[in-house]
Image (cartoon, rainbow, N blue to C red):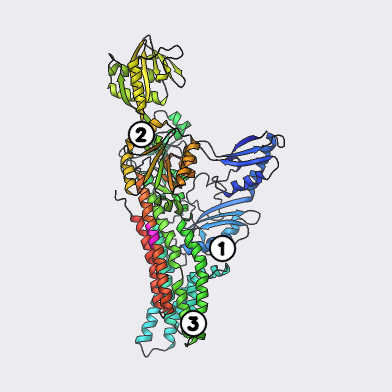
Amino acid sequence: MTQTLQLDIPLVLPEVPDTSDACVGRLLADLEGRGGVEKAHVIPRNGEEEAKLCIHYDPGTLPLSRIREIVQAAGAEITRRFGHALWQVDGIGHQRRARTVAESLGALPGVLEADADAAGLVRVEFDRRQSSEQAILDALAGMGITPVAPPPLAKAERSAHAHRDHGDHDHDDPEHSHEGHSHAHGGFLGPNTELIFSLACGALLAVGFGIQTLVAAAPEWLPTVLYIGAYGLGGFYTLREAIDNLRLRKFEIDTLMLVAAAGAAALGAWAEGALLLFLFSLGHALEHYAMGRARQAIEALAKLAPRTATVRREGGAHEVPVEELVVGDLVVVRPNERLPADGFLVKGTSSIDQAPVTGESIPVDKHPVEDAAAARARPASVGAESRVFAGTINGAGAIEVEVTRLSSESALAKVVQMVSEAETQKSPTQRFTDRFERIFVPCVLALAIILLFAWVVIDEPFADSFYRAMAVLVAASPCALAIATPSAVLSGVARAARGGVLVKGGAPLENLGSLSAIAFDKTGTLTEGRPRITDIVPAEGVTRDELLTVAVAVEQLSDHPLAAAIARDGREALAGRHIPDAQALESLTGRGVTATLEGTPVWIGKAGMFGTDGIATLDKPVAEAAARLGEAGRTTMVVRRGERDLGAIGLMDTPRPAAHDTLQRLRGLGITRMIMISGDNRTVAEAIARKVGLDEAWGDLMPEDKVEAIRKLRAEGPVAMVGDGVNDAPAMAHATVGIAMGAAGSDVALETADVALMADDLSHLPFAVGLSRRTRSIIRQNVFISLGVVALLVPATIFGLGIGPAVALHEGSTLIVVFNALRLLAWRDRD
């Protein structure tokens, strides 16, 4: 008989950041290949429970103790063998360079996977039997790439599996600052060396051309010498990258440019060759600057948190670096200061501007937690009215905050890390352009070779055929196409982060804009997640205050959410009137409660509780009132004191104030179908749906039913699932795009969602959809511009357009594409 064993994945693979890591797949394959193991799979993380490894095994072949040993040994072996490194580096200024670096690293022995992006993030997975971090760092150094300050990492990413010591590189020095760094190629003249070289190249070109055309008495060799100098300055960085590509047996844009420049020199057209290299190097340098603008938007997030914090220790207040804060520290935050860490208020009240993290437009009132001991035991249970985040701005009140996360684990640090990594996750359009380039470049080379021998077919000198072939190489180079999508994705992701929306890469960013249907969870998404009294129906001869007084007196003794709602809202309705004390509360599980009030028994519960287990049936008017409330989608509680029915109270999880307007805005953006999927009964779900303006509501759904509902919707087209990121994680994973609410306070939401609304605010969803659609539009424009220029220039150069004009148009299109993408940084939600 088959049995199952479930183990927490972090215990088996302690250095694996998440279940999508390749090491998890290796472990599953290893286990399934062993005798006695029938199946091994992953159970995703749910709530506070870690992701689990589930093994189905035959106890007759493998006893429980043995299967545990096998799993632990397999996990330890994989951890020892496979390593991951993540570095923020200097020396990658554009996407083509990033691709060259990634492919160079991927060609190293033992490197299993390598990614790099224009934002300067390099991620490598390697086999320790064949390689090491130092070997990879040495290879990066050989390409002129050097690690700088490590990116802010989440807890799992800070483990040895994700980020290890870098030897002699002292990255933990707080004075090691890179503020204002352009992250272009480095050099002995600083980060702007390439731009300086390019401008110097242009100056030599201009002087040489001026002497050649205006100074008749000048020696003939002088302009040539100046042009050669321009070649050296303009081609320095281009040659370095071309050499890297040739080592990989690749012919990229840089190689084509050098061949064209060399061909021009061979024909004696030194001025035209120098112009080509000047414009190409200037285009690169300006591209680095433009991409740096998008990168700086990301880096600006990391600078929001202060460097020091005032902490209460040893009976006094001491100023310490935020890196030295530990969980449980009490931090003093003065008025108008930025908060140094995530935590909860324990003293003082204030309004806090949370826009840097959650995107909320107005300050949020914060109050101390009522039970600090309970908050310490379960930090995740702290309500939004007491939870605070690093990088947010305190208002006019002095407060004290108890730290719940290290500085490297704060919500702000996670946002910076995930936004930085997002650009490496390619969008559908980028995958298409990459495939297109792999086919297009060889075709261009073939066309150039054919044109090189055009003099054999047509009556023209070899020099003319050679020049035409070089011009076609320049015109057909897919330079703008290579940067068209990455620049837009990076800008879009950075703009979303500034608006309180975390988008994990190009694919979710594009997919979000393609949606025509969105499914919403009910509780905590379309509703506030806590019930409120909506109806008070006293029996004949009973006053409203009498009914509420008895209900509040009993329910204030219970910790049930419905009881808490009755007690809270009832007190507000009674406006300070005296409420007697009830005694001897007893829970009738699943039905209600009973207690004694002033010597008289009281029952409060569902209508079905009455008439069973010796409890008298309800009076007909009260039973009918309870039925009417139930039909209207209310959760109904009936109150009886002694032998007298006092009436019924209807409760409902009330819709969020912004829900109706948000759904209307989504319709205006072209979302044609919006559905609520809920675990509540269908009547309740439909009642909420009517209030918020939804046409469809599916109720009585278990988590597996929600997954099936998403599969059904996805079969009809792209669909997003909006939930809280915990109970809805399976459904979110099966949707085209999973969107989590209130992710700033939830590690699970940040891990499971493709898109995370950092604030618990549904109104940010239209902003995210609108930005995505704008990004898709920019990407399409960029692809059209880049391909259109190539389609125009190739025939033009074949029929005689020179290298100079071809370069000017070609590199001009590259800059247009980049600056077009940067418009996303200034995009505003018009609604």
Which stretch did the figure color magenta?
Answer: 777-781
Q: Is residue 773 left or right of residue 63?
A: left
**Is residue 780 within the magenta segment?**
yes
Mark sitting on residue 466: 3
Q: Quadrant of residue 114?
A: bottom right
Residue 111: x and y in percent read 60, 57
**Is residue 393 within the magenta segment?**
no
> Which residue position holds label 1?
104
Residue 151: x and y in percent read 48, 51
Mark pair 2, 1: CA separation: 56 Å
Per the image, label 2 sits on a secondary structure element best described as helix
Q: Residues within 10 Å of mark 1 (few under 14, many from 20)?
A: some
Mark sitting on residue 434: none
Residue 632: x and y in percent read 34, 28
- Identify the mark nearer the N-term, 2 or 1: 1
Q: Residues within 10 Å of mark 3 (few under 14, many from 20)?
A: many
The foreground one among 395 and 5 is 5
Per the image, label 3 sits on a secondary structure element best described as helix
From the image, give the main secondary structure of the stretch colored magenta: helix
Asked whether residue 200 appears in the rendered view, the answer is no
Determine whether 404 is above or below 584 in the image: below
Residue at left offset 28%, top offset 18%? 545
Q: Amino acid at mark 2?
A: Ile
- Identify the mark nearer the N-term, 1 or 3: 1
Q: Amino acid at mark 3?
A: Phe
> Which residue position holds label 2?
688
Determine whether 132 is above or below 478 in the image: above
Instruction: Point out the frontmost of discs 1 and 3.
Output: 3
* Tally of numbered discs: 3
- Identify the mark nearer the N-term, 3 or 2: 3
Instruction: Point out the frontmost of discs 2 and 1.
Output: 2
